[in-house]
Image (spheres, rainbow, N blue to C red):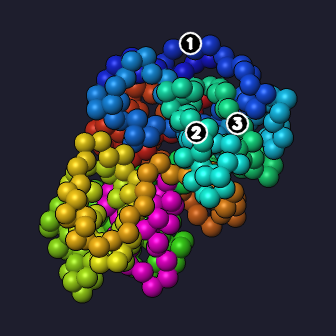
Amino acid sequence: MRGVVMYAAGDVRVEEREDPKIIEPTDAIVKLTATCICGSDLWLYRGIEPADHTLMGHEYVGVVEEVGAAVKTVKPGDFVVGSFVISDNTCEICQAGFQSKCVHAEFVHAGIGTQAEKARIPLADGTLVATPGQPDPELVPALLAASDVLGTGWYAAVAAEAGPGKTVAVVGDGAVGLMAVLAAKQLGAERIIAMSRHPERQKLARYYGATDIVEERGNEGVAKIKELTNGLGAHSVVEAVGTQESFMQAVGATRGGGHLGYVGVNYDVSIPGIELFFAGIHTLGGPAPVRRFLPDLIQLIRDRKIDPGKVFDLTLPLEQAAEGYKAMDERRATKVILTF
């Protein structure tokens, strides 16, 4: 089969990889319908995270081709959406709703790599969710978004306790930030402030429910949020970038007693303890437990109540994956879908 391999920073290749096979009785083989490039993949592309013949991709939807003898919840022919973290969905931590910290957790990225024609998914019963019947083709991008960015944005909004009567500020206008805007709207937030300097992303943020746009960053961004909230700051803040500036901006924009949901992969971020101490806020984040939300998100998509697929603004065949990485790195694309 064909799959994406990153040899080193900036060196993306599509080459022949061995077809996956059932190894454990809990495995499933999925023939992928679509996959995509994530903003977190750019950490390797930019050399911030090491890449050495790394199997790329962790977002995926497709049709089950084969299952191990112990798999009970999915069968060959099922269309499935999978989380970017493998989980058994039965351990105490999974049952508490944190499947990304499952005692058997394994990242799909690197070890499996779903920017490919097929993938072996371990712990299929706990990781994959089958849709009721085959989805209409136009829903495939939306279902693909549920595999990571929608689930991650949703988790960020839940972690920030977005809801009725709340003002939500979203730091970051990438795919996850935009999905957090969508989630905050669905969760009933009264006011949603999207922090963005990118005109096209501002339009999409407004489409998903943003009521205000703030272009300022850093201390100026914090000041603007406070100006819009009677000097108090937002009740709920989502951090969806992962840089030092964005994280501290998010901390500063959260009102005393408010909630910060952080899902940006925060390499090299150092949080001054004294600033966090005196901020007096709740914080929750990390890798999103997408599996917790998948059944509900799939239903919302099937009912056409949400359309997260609009976050994809460039579609390329798998063979042109390198161009997709370049487009996202240069911010010419928000999120790239790869087709077969």
Front-lying residue, 52 or 215: 52
Residue 119, how many percent across, how many down? 64, 27
Instruction: Check the picture and name the quadrant holding the N terminus.
Output: top right
Q: Which mark is residue 16?
A: 1
Residue 29, how many percent across, how many down? 72, 28
Figure label count: 3
Give the residues in magenta. 152-172
Tell me which amino acid carries mark 1.
Glu
Residue under the point 38% across and 29% down? 323
Asked if the stretch drawn in magenta spans residue 163, the answer is yes
Q: Are marks 2 and 1 in contact (CB under 8 Å)?
A: no
Q: Which mark is residue 303?
A: none
Q: Secondary structure at mark 2?
A: loop
Is tag 2's residue or tag 1's residue first in the polypeptide sequence?
1
Left or right: 223, with 295 as reference point: left
Is tag 3's residue or tag 1's residue first in the polypeptide sequence?
1
The residue beneath circle 2 is 105
Q: CA distance from mark 2 to mark 1?
A: 27 Å
The residue beneath circle 3 is 123
Q: Secondary structure at mark 1?
A: strand
Residue 150, how many percent across, how many down? 52, 54
Left or right: 226, with 33 as reference point: left
Left or right: 56, with 213 as reference point: right
Q: Are marks 2 and 3 in contact (CB under 8 Å)?
A: no
